[in-house]
Image (cartoon, rainbow, N blue to C red):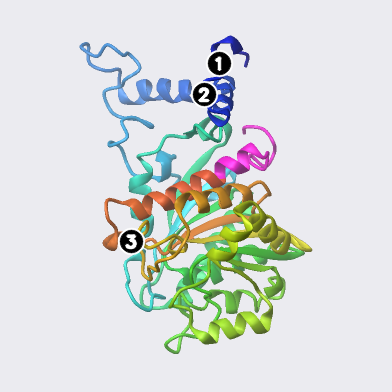
Amino acid sequence: MSFDESTLHDRSGPEARAALAAEARLPTTRWDEEVNRGLELGLPGADSIVDRRIPTFSRGELPHFAGINTFLKAPYVEDVGLAGEYDVAVFGAPFDGGTTYRPGTRFGPQGIRRISALYGPYSFELGVDLRESITMCDLGDIFTIPANIEKTFDQITKGVSHVFASGAFPVVLGGDHSIGFPTTRGVAEHLDGKLGIIHFDRHVDTQETDLDERMHTTPWFHATNLANVPAENLVQVGIGGWQAPRPGVATGRERRTTIMTVTDCVNMGIEAAAERALEVAWHGAEAVWLSFDVDCLDAAFVPGTGWPEPGGFLPREVLKFIQLIAERPLAGIEVVECSPPYDNADITSLIATRVICDTLGCLVRAGHLPKNGALS
């Protein structure tokens, strides 16, 4: 799509100028289809409505405060057998039976979906319109078993395995971080080679048990026991503070995981830290899984989480990190430890939404989505 470059001027900043040019090249095909679909299914608007693109019943993105809460208002697909017809499949793992302090992450998928209605599919800085670039659906939630963590793990593994095998890119809305073990197990069983993990968190989560069970402090001990998920390909970003159980620290040291604190990342620069994370996670690996715990951010930005810890990343730091990570392909992403009952003005759910959107946007920009290289 061409545009008149004379409309650009040099008073804008370089990133903004590039964004203005990129937007002019984006199509509106899918937006036009959504408008027409809304008029067909939702009835044309009342005679007093001047903008004839507005239907009587809300269908699609607008208005942001209306409609049924799926992630980014993606279509809800009740038949999970159809997941493979979409480039991206979003689904929840509403479970907080692995928490060891503040619960509430079973409501994480609901909170993330609710505030995701605030967003549209277009990012100014990234120059990407998800609606025009990929197809996305919301599959609803895994049926978790509140009183049985092992049965819940089996349910999550089966769900992730199904979506990954379908060819859709899995986006998992947690849920506490105990789900990190069954999610990676669901991906690893489909790989001939190794699975690397990039893990954002303030906590190591590598002890064998906590309170006599596998909990949200233990996923990577058990994930790295899987035959093709070696600890040498586990990168842990943002670790630090006063909530790092020593058994988990000892496990990381013994298994030779790679740990970078917030200070490490800031001092070496986010670009260099991301480069190291990618190098380690991808070393000899067939695929890499991204596990993002919202508590890697400073507690001021994520009050709605189970174990908030001051001294974490700033949002712009972690978003830059994520954007660099997603320049390489990913097997999928999980965002965990979002606890809406403790949140303030949905800001924790909002950062969870933003991390997912930036990940998808950068995968599109880098050509990793859609997987066939063209809009399906």
Q: Position of residue 267 (x, y in %)?
A: 59, 60
Q: Are marks 2 and 1 in contact (CB under 8 Å)?
A: yes
Residue pictured at 27% horizontal, 51% vertical: 345
Residue type, mark 1 in image: Leu
Q: Position of residue 3 (x, y in %)?
A: 59, 12
Residue 132 higher or lower than 147, as above or below:
above
Of the pair 332 and 293, the residue shown nearer to us: 293
Mark before the other along the chain sequence, 3 or 2: 2
Q: Position of residue 291 (x, y in %)?
A: 55, 61
> Tag 2: Cα neighbours inside 10 Å, few (<14), some, or many (≥20)?
few
Please identify, in this view, whether the residue under mark 2 or under mark 1 is nearer the observer. Answer: 2
Q: CA distance from mark 2 to mark 1?
A: 8 Å
Residue pictured at 69% horizontal, 68% vertical: 233
> Tag 3: Cα neighbours inside 10 Å, few (<14), some, or many (≥20)?
many
Q: CA distance from mark 3 to mark 1?
A: 42 Å
The span shown in magenta is 360-376
Q: Secondary structure at mark 1?
A: loop
Residue 170 shown in magenta: no
Mark before the other along the chain sequence, 3 or 1: 1
Q: In the figure, is residue 86 to the left or right of 343? A: right
Please identify, in this view, whether the residue under mark 3 or under mark 1 is nearer the observer. Answer: 1
Residue pictured at 42% horizontal, 51% vertical: 351
Q: Main SS type for the magenta part?
A: loop
Q: Which mark is residue 257?
A: none
Q: Quadrant of the N terminus?
A: top right
Q: Is residue 360 visible?
A: yes
Q: Which residue is mark 3?
A: 304
Q: Which residue is mark 2?
A: 12
